[in-house]
Amino acid sequence: MEERLIVSMIHVFFIAFGVMVGGAFIGSLGSLLTGEAPYTSMVRISKGLRIWAIVAAIGGTFDTIARFEKGILDGSTFDMFKQIMVIVAAMGGVKAALLFFQWILQEDIT
């Protein structure tokens, strides 16, 4: 495999992880200021941020769709493979963040 793909996958993983952790922590500060329970809101926010963390990590959806189109129409299967691996890495970052919250909050997040 190309080394650049591995580097890109690592970046995407940690971007998705950072979006989830940062968004949930900062969002829970807003809940703390309004008198709501921050742990409960952290769980709620992390559930809502899943898809947005993936989209932010892969750099938007239009570029991904264009690469899939190139892979299908031009027969460039390696481009499709790269995009699939990047999306899987982003999903892994989201899952790692959810496991991190489950570990910190001692609450089951589904």
Image (spheres, rainbow, N blue to C red):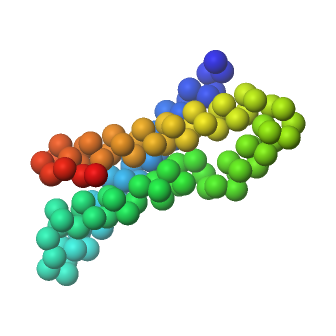
Q: Nearer the viewer, residue 76 or 2?
A: 76
User: Residue 63 in the image: x percent, y percent?
Assistant: 70, 51
Q: Nearer the viewer, residue 5 or 108?
A: 108
Residue 28 lies, with reference to residue 75, above or below; the image says below
What residue lies at 46% left-to-right and 39% top-to-bottom?
13
- Quadrant (top left/top right/bottom left/bottom right) for the N terminus: top right
What residue lies at 26% left-to-right and 74% top-to-bottom?
30
User: Residue 91 in the image: x percent, y percent?
Assistant: 46, 43
Residue at the top extreme, as displayed: 1
Residue 59 lies, with reference to residue 90, above or below; the image says below
- Residue 44 appearing in the image: yes
Q: Quadrant of residue 77?
A: top right
Q: Nearer the viewer, residue 108 or 87?
A: 108
Residue at the bottom extreme, as displayed: 34
- Residue 11 appearing in the image: no
Left or right, 1 with respect to 69, comes to left
User: Residue 76 in the image: x percent, y percent?
Assistant: 80, 31
User: Residue 29 in the image: x percent, y percent?
Assistant: 23, 69
What residue lies at 42% left-to-right and 38% top-to-bottom?
92
